[in-house]
Structure formats: C-alpha cells, structure tokens
Amino acid sequence: MYGQEQLVTVHAENATETSSNQQNDYYKVAPKAVVLTEDGYIYSSPNLDVASEKAKISKGTILEVLSIAYSNTDLPCLKVDGGYISAAKSLSVESSESEKGNTITAESSSESSNVVDNSSEKNSAAGIDSDKRESENLLKHESDKKLGSSNADTNEQVKVETSKTMQSRAVAARSAVDLSKYYTTNSGQIVALTDIKLYSEVGLKNVIKTISAGSLLKTQGVEYASGYPRFKVPGGYITANRSFVIQPTSNIANYYTTNTGQIVAITDIKVYSEVGLKTVVRTVTAGNLLKTQGVEYAGGYPRFKVSDGYITANKSYVVQPTSNIANYYTTNTGQIAALSDIHVYSDVALTKLVKTVSAGTLLKVQGVEYIGGYPRYKLSNGYITTNKSFVVQPVSSISNYYTTNPGQISALKTTHLYSDIDLKNIVKKVSAGTVYKVQKIQYSTSGYPRFKVAGGFISANKSIVATYKGSSTTEKANKVIALAKTKLGDPYTQSASGRLGPNSFDCSGFVYYIYKTALGIVLPGTTTTTEEPAGKEVSLNALKPGDLLFYGTRGNTYHVGIYEGNGIMIHAATPEEGVRETAIKYYEPSFARRILN
C-alpha cells in the first residue's frame, strides 16, 4: 500500500513475475535525475540483492540517472554514478534539478518567479492523504472478503490492483511537484523569509505556533508528504519552499537576523536603494543611530531595511545598541562637559583607569566607539562614558562662557545670585563690581556652565562677569571712574533710604557706593567725617584718579567727591545739579585722601 511505503529495495531473489500493471510502476525511460523519497542503498549489481548493497543513501538525495538497467528477473533499475538503485516510482520522484549531488543551495538555484502557496501544498497533501485513507479502507475491506472467500487468488489480485491504482495517483501527485522551488536536503540552518507556521505533522496540518520572519532555525532533516519536502525542526515541521525560507550564508552568526528596531553604525556605512546593496543612496557616519523596519535577504545574506533603503546587517559594521540608548550620546559632539567627577580609561570596556576628570571639565571628543551595545567617547588619552547622567553636550555658544575656573570674578553689571544651577531661584541681587571667589564650574543639564560661589550660583556668561585678578592701581582706578561716570545725571538726595544709591545719592553716599560696588572696598563710614580716615593723605599737587577730595576742616568736612583726572571731579553736587563733573580750579578742595595704593 502507498500509505505503508517503507522499503527502497526490491531484491531479485524475492521478486516474482511482474504483471503489466506492476511494470507501469517502474521507470521505463531513464529520467535525468531523481530524488529519493525514502532512505535506501546503492547496489553494485542490477539484481539489487543484499549481497550487492554498496552504500546507504538518505531520503531527499538527488541522483543523476545514467541509464535503465535490468535484473536477471527482468525488473528495471536505474544506473547511477557508483552503482544501481531501484526504478520503482514509489521510491523516488523525478527531479527537475539537473545538478548532480545531494546538496542544492540558494546560491546554486535561481529565484523562482512562481510562488507556491502553503495552502496549495496543504490542500494537495490533504487530497493525497484522503486517497491514502480511501486505499487503506478499501484494502481492509478486500482483506476481510479474503478471509471469507474460497477464491484467495482472486481477492489478492483485487488487493494488488486497487493498491497500485491508488499508489499511481499518489506517485503522479509527487511527480507534479516542482522540486526546484524547494530545499530537498538538510541545510543545517534555515531562515524564515516571512512569518511561517510550525506544524506538529509533516503534512502541515496542526499549527503549533507562528515563527516570525527573520528567525533562524536549526534543521534536523528533510521529510516528505505527498511529494512535498518539509524541514524537520525542533518541535515540528516547517515548509521547505524557497519562497518562504532561505538557506543563510555559512557565517550567518556574524549577522543580525531579526529586526532590532534600532541599529548603530560602528564605521561609516552606505545606504543602498536595493537589498542587493548595489546602488548607493547615501553614507551614514559612524555612531549614527538608525531605525530598522525589518530584515530582508539577498543570496542568503540578511540586510536591514531602513527608511530610505537597505544597509548591511554584518556585526562588524553595525551594532544593536543597549535598550536604554536614549540615555547616551551616540554621535561625536566635538566637546563634552563632565557633570560630575568621571574617570578616563585606556580601554573602551572602561576597565583600566588612567585618571579622574573633575566636574565641570570641558573635554575634546575624537569619536564614538561601541562595546556590547554601549557607546563610549574616544578622547586623546582614552575613553569615557557617554551616559547623559555623567556628561553633557555644551551649548553651541559655549565660546561666550567661561569654561575654566578663573579663581575670582567681578560682576560687569547688575546680576543675581541663584540657589540652583538652572538659575531659577534668586537669592539676592548682585551689584556691578561685586567680586566673588569661584569654588568651581558646574554645568546644567541643558549644557550651560555656571560659577559655583559662596551662597549659590552665578552665570558664567562673559557679558555678565569678568575675571578678577586683583587689578593694578591704574586698573582699579579706571573701574572706579568708569562706574562713577555711569551715574552722571542721577539725582541728589539726603533721604536715608536713597542717599546710598544705586539710583540717587548725596556726596558721601556716592563715594561709598562707588568704591564698594566697583572694587568691593568698604569705606569706614557713609558721611564725610567718617570717611576722612580712609586711605592716606596726599598732596593736592599730586592727585591721581580715584583720590577722594574733601571740603572743610578736618573732623568737620561738609563735602566729598572723586578725582577723575585732568583737573575734573565727579560728585553728587546739589539737589539742583545731581551727579556731575566739576573743574576743581573753580571749586578747590581742602585736602585729599588716596584709597588705592
């Protein structure tokens, strides 16, 4: 019976005279090639007896047929390279493959233009399974008849002829399968080109699960159902149709075979317009992160599908990033600032410490390299993390800011002291000229450098603060005069709330404000008499810019101003004139005190 077809060998010593119907079950004309549907042997003799068994051959093997030969009982057999095999059509199927040997790969067969649908396979297989069941039922019936019949020979003839008729239908179905569209030998590994089903039976009837496109499967062998080859895999069977599966390149372990969602270029790579990677669309710079839409194959090689084409899936050129890659910088930012103290390592794995870099240090970046999906910054002397918790890309206008600790700074204009690094919560107003000692530079998470000073943070913007170096006497005097000139025209007042500035003054309040604001120097008092002891007395004939000019007798002075130079004094004159400049030759002072050494 076809359904119980197991033997590959027909031994001559067991063969009886063959009827004409039986002869039709054998090849009479040599096919170009056959594929075995069962395990069997190559024999050294056309008699195909046990004594002439030469080599075992596996189901699925494709053999080139040289000619037809006959046994000593006139049974036909097939002459193949190395010996003979049975010519029974139930034991082999005529193959459309012309290639000799037992291996057919994706590289050695052209792409089929006709896609064979799995459902067609299943329907065909189901039909043949139905024929097999019909044959088996009929034979059982005939066997029962045989038990009650006196004409055993007649019943046996019915049995044989019925079985052969059904067998011929099954063989015809097998022969109709175009095996060039299928893998017929165990390729060891296979990749799903589309989502495919895993079945519990070789006839592909009972679905176990769906296997996603791109999945790499180990194949344990090839088995046939109704002429269709199937791959035996762990857990069941899958189609061997080349439209749905592909034999991967032998070094497939060096490639990604599933959609990673994101991929990073390890080196500069090309994007191509087609999966065969022939026509360049653009170049992707090393370190760039790309979204992948899927995996497609060409000649057994997987490619990543991206928005505008295809890229290689070779692990030497691309890497799957860590799942939390959004927390890392993935491209060369040129410069990077340490948010906290960080380490520089000699190796990309960050295992061999070179040195520690202080928080606020600005570093020059040479590139980005990856290890285990984690990006690292390459510096001139090693590697650092690109984790955004530890480093930050500075603002593009970083040249407008101080990035190293100057030691001391002076406010160029009125600004503020803040309690937080993002400069949102004001502690107090800071007047122009106020000097602060800088403890360190820290960066906000948005990439702005800040000066950490006693009590909080101040902007490091060069238009707001300047480096204070303990200026020379001339520089200090210039700052005093420069600030004083900004007050020209401000009103004169003797009110307690307004006389000390910053927008109105009396004479002693004016000089007190200017020195404190410009240089941080606090005079001994805020009245003329309490300011008299400041500094040292100098001759009116040797005045220098910044000297204080007093009017009245010592201990009982009534007015004070600041010498500007060239015989000019700046002072808060009268309620009518406010802050103004006056030539001292018209208003000669009584004595002078020098505050600046």
Image (cartoon, rainbow, N blue to C red):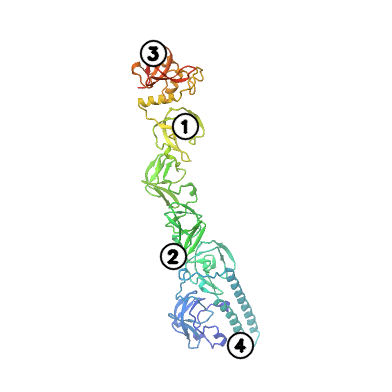
Tell whether label 2 touches label 1 (CB within 8 Å). no
| Residue shown at the point (47%, 43%) measured from the top left | 389
Type of amino acid at the residue the image marks with label 3? Ser
- The disc, 4 or 3, on the residue closer to the chain's N-terminal end is 4
Location of residue 415 in the rendering, given as x and y in whole percent from the top left corner: 47, 30
For disc 2, the marked residue is 250
Q: CA distance from mark 1 to mark 4?
A: 112 Å
User: Residue 177, located in which quarter of the rendered image?
Assistant: bottom right
User: Residue 283, located in which quarter of the rendered image?
Assistant: bottom left
Q: CA distance from mark 2 to mark 4?
A: 58 Å
For residue 153, the mark is 4
- The disc, 1 or 2, on the residue closer to the chain's N-terminal end is 2
For disc 3, the marked residue is 590
Tell whether label 4 touches label 1 (CB within 8 Å). no
- The disc, 2 or 4, on the residue closer to the chain's N-terminal end is 4
Q: CA distance from mark 3 to mark 1?
A: 45 Å
Location of residue 416 in the rendering, given as x and y in whole percent from the top left corner: 48, 30
Q: CA distance from mark 4 to mark 3?
A: 156 Å
Instruction: Please tell me whether residue 442 is drawn above or below residue 291 in the rendered image.
Output: above
Type of amino acid at the residue the image marks with label 2? Ser
For residue 96, the mark is none
SS at mark 4? helix
Q: Nearer the viewer, mark 3 or mark 1?
A: 3
Left or right of 282? Residue 163 is: right
